[in-house]
Image (cartoon, helix red, strand yellow):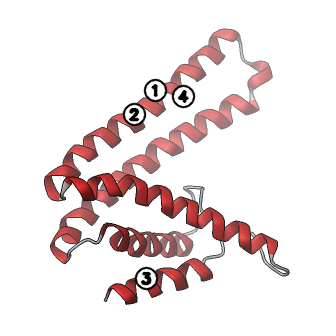
Amino acid sequence: MKKLLILTAVVLLNSFQVLVAQDELEPSKREKLDALKVAFLTNELNLTSTEAQSFWPLYNELEDKMREIRKKKRDNRIDTKTNHADLTDTQLSVAIDRELAFEQQELDLKKEYNERFKKILPIKKVAKLHAAEHNFRKELLHRAKDRTKTPGGSPH
């Protein structure tokens, strides 16, 4: 079963053609990314079926909330960047404060869910989660970078 998960993750990584550092993807690409992430994290954390049943709904809830915050943060940045020259110092200061408030919301959410994860997973798996998420993003970036270097490779 573990080999099947690893094989599935490798196949999905190799076939995945979009750098997904962005949160707004078309639904089919979001589904592929989510499936890839589930396989990768399940394997990295070595989740039992019982742990997975409790973990994934909670993790998906966190991801949805983080996506909302990131969207607001991105909208704030776009608004500030496009109107930068026209904004007063006070308006720019408010935009910076909002940016920091979004970062604080993300941190508060991570702390809240970290405590919730501790209730359903052994602490070693909670600690591994953060490293596994980082490794997942790093692997996606690496694969996308390799794809752009190969002849005929497409970054999109």
> Tags 1 and 4 in contact by the CB under 8 Å rule?
yes
Q: CA distance from mark 4 to mark 2?
A: 10 Å
Q: CA distance from mark 3 to mark 4?
A: 38 Å
Q: Amino acid at mark 3?
A: Ile
Q: Earlier in the sequence, mark 3 or mark 4?
A: 3
The C terminus sits in image quarter: bottom right
Does the image show residue 153? yes
Label 4: state its secondary structure: helix
Q: CA distance from mark 3 to mark 1?
A: 39 Å
**Mark 4, residue position:** 99
| 54, above or below 32, in the image | above
**Mark 2, residue position:** 105
Q: Amino acid at mark 2?
A: Gln
Does the image show residue 19? no
Q: CA distance from mark 3 to mark 2?
A: 34 Å
| 30, above or below 113, in the image | below
Q: Earlier in the sequence, mark 3 or mark 1?
A: 3
